[in-house]
Image (tube, rainbow, N blue to C red):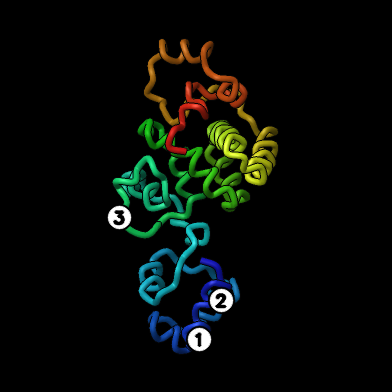
């Protein structure tokens, strides 16, 4: 969460840093570090902060540092972030920063098709995510093609919705990724597809997928929940 948010909530409740530290079970010095941005609030403190009545913007949630895929319930987390396609899974407040959830999902070798279809929505909805962090993590994991493809689909959705400011923001992210485009063909988190499927997609995929060297038939027109 942001240091400004923590400070504002503390002051709204009339607490000084010592009182806040007492309620959280930490030192006043640590609270001071958090508020000044000298240290990040760790993920394990989320529940305590919410119990103190602090509203947490998903974009300000602390990173989990890429936990095991088995620990991620994508349907649940996307639902908590507002994705209508998984509305029936909604069960609480968001626990994942959208930026990290995006990178984690794109890192999957084989991702449920319904989850993959939700990723352009995630980019569209949270287009102000920490893109510097996303780009760095994507390059470390050779995910540039998958990320670029996701961004271009989200950009087309933004144009369709007349969200021109969002479309311009995503256009900048797409352009910044172009120079790191990987020559090797990738799938859209579907590495288990057969050679016949790969051959078919290589000649019939949409232009967006071809541009980003991704074997996928996904198009913005099919993303009904976005």
Residue 179 screen position, x and y as percent: 70, 33
Please report contact status of discs 2 and 3: CB closer than 8 Å, yes or no.
no
| Image-based side of 113 in relation to 208, left or right | left
Q: Where on the picture, by quarter, is residue 190?
A: top left
- Residue designated by label 3: 91
Number of numbered labels in the structure image: 3
Of circles 3 and 1, which is in front?
A: 3
Label 3 CA crowd tier, 10 Å (few <14, some 14–19, many 20+) = few
Task: Name the residue located 58 percent from the left edge and 48 percent from the top edge.
Answer: 127
- Residue designated by label 1: 17
| Image-based side of 226 in relation to 179, left or right | left
| Image-based side of 26 in relation to 5, left or right | left
Residue 43 screen position, x and y as percent: 42, 64
Please report contact status of discs 1 and 2: CB closer than 8 Å, yes or no.
yes
Task: Name the residue located 66 percent from the left edge and 42 percent from the top edge.
Answer: 164
Residue 77 screen position, x and y as percent: 37, 50
Q: Is residue 171 visible?
A: yes
Task: Name the residue located 58 percent from the left edge and 73 percent from the top edge.
Answer: 4
Does dot 1 land on a helix, a strand or a loop?
helix
- Residue 35: assigned label: 2
Please report contact status of discs 3 and 1: CB closer than 8 Å, yes or no.
no
Q: Is residue 144 visible?
A: no
Rounded to the nearest angstrom, the CA distance separating label 1 from label 2 is 9 Å
């Amino acid at each position: 969460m942001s240091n400004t948010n923590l400070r504002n909530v503390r002051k709204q409740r009339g607490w000084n840093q010592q009182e806040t530290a007492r309620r959280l079970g930490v030192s006043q010095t640590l609270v001071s570090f958090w508020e000044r941005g000298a240290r990040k609030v760790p993920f394990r403190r989320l529940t305590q902060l919410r119990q103190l009545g602090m509203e947490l913007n998903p974009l300000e949630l602390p990173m989990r540092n890429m936990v095991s895929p088995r620990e991620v319930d994508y349907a649940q987390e996307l639902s908590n972030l507002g994705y209508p396609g998984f509305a029936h899974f909604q069960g609480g407040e968001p626990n994942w920063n959208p930026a990290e959830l995006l990178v984690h999902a794109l890192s999957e070798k084989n991702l449920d098709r319904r989850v993959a279809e939700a990723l352009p929505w995630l980019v569209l909805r949270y287009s102000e995510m920490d893109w510097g962090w996303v780009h760095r993590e994507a390059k470390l994991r050779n995910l540039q093609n998958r990320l670029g493809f996701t961004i271009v689909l989200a950009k087309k959705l933004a144009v369709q919705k007349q969200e021109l400011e969002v479309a311009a923001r995503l256009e900048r992210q797409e352009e910044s990724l172009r120079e790191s485009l990987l020559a090797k063909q990738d799938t859209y988190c579907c590495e288990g597809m057969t050679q016949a499927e790969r051959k078919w997609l290589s000649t019939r995929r949409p232009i967006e997928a071809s541009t980003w060297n991704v074997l996928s038939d996904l198009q913005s027109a099919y993303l009904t929940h976005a």
